[in-house]
Amino acid sequence: MNSTELSFNPKWKSLLALTLIGCLCSFGALAASEEIQVYLDDKEEAGQLSVDWHNNYVISGRSNPQYLGEQAPDRVYRLTPELNYGLTDTLELGFYLLSALDHQGNLTGEGAKVRLKYIAPHEEEGLFWGLNLEVGEQATRVSQNPWHGELKGIMGLHDGRWTLGSNLNIDTSLDAHPGSPTADLDFKINYRIVEKTQLGLESYNELGAIHHFDSLNQNSKTLFAVVDTEAMGMDLNAGVGKGLTHASDRWTLKFILGTKF
């Protein structure tokens, strides 16, 4: 390994600093969602189809419901197949089917979502950006507001062996009484150790209502150690997450398998 592989062009240092700050600030989540992932610039080419299998399991988490009818997250396994289809060189259509298995062995459907992702044209090396719009319905077991929408801003950088990414997510209820939209800020930093294998950190941070962010220790904060690689011809993102506030699940496992057709 030579020194140039580890160095950064000075104009990218501000983005690296932002990513590192996000990861460090998380030391300090609510139930694991159906999709624990930081969006980067990956998308299917026009006419191509793939399925991502999102698997999340709360090893140790909150066991008391916070509202009538909620499924507390402790020892809940969530499986979410995600169908992806490339519409154009910049647009991708996605569809999620949500399900959950509780610690008593009860399997339930949790709803469905549809999304449209845009990734702006860019070079392999350097900055990239995009947007993701998602609309769906979840069972009241996992959300007090079943119908909701999310707009996700995507920004990142490929620089040699390093990959950095950040997502700003704005969520709002689409029910009759939506309340204030909320925000999340997520970060990812990866380093490629060998071809097709990267190690890194992912940080998931709830900020609260956008009109007045809460203090850092009052929101969901989770930090994952992750590996991105290939297994049996499939893309694999796997990690273990530590909740770092009282609102968090204490330990969560996740892995995403990506299959192409």
Image: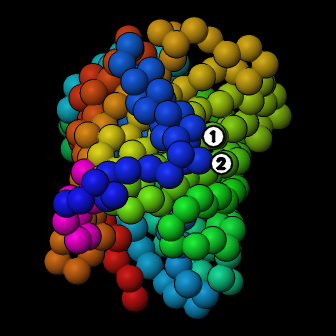
Q: Is residue 76 above or below residue 41?
A: above
Considering depth in this image, is 257 or 10 the residue closer to the camera?
A: 10
Dot 1 corresponds to which residue?
168
Q: Is residue 138 visible?
A: no
When asked about the image quadrant of residue 202, the answer is: top left
Q: Give the CA separation, mark 2 to mark 1.
A: 6 Å
* Label 2 environment density (alpha carbons within 10 Å; few <14, some 14–19, many ≥20): many
Highlighted magenta segment, given as a residue range: 192-199
In percent of width and height, residue 147 lies at 68, 44
**Mark sitting on residue 152:** 2
Residue placed furthest toward the right: 176
Instruction: Specify whether 36 is left or right of 77.
Output: right
Residue 213 screen position, x and y as percent: 67, 16
Residue at x 20% of width, y 32% of height: 59
The magenta stretch spans residue 196: yes
Residue type, label 2: Lys
- Check contact, mark 2 vs mark 1: CB within 8 A: yes
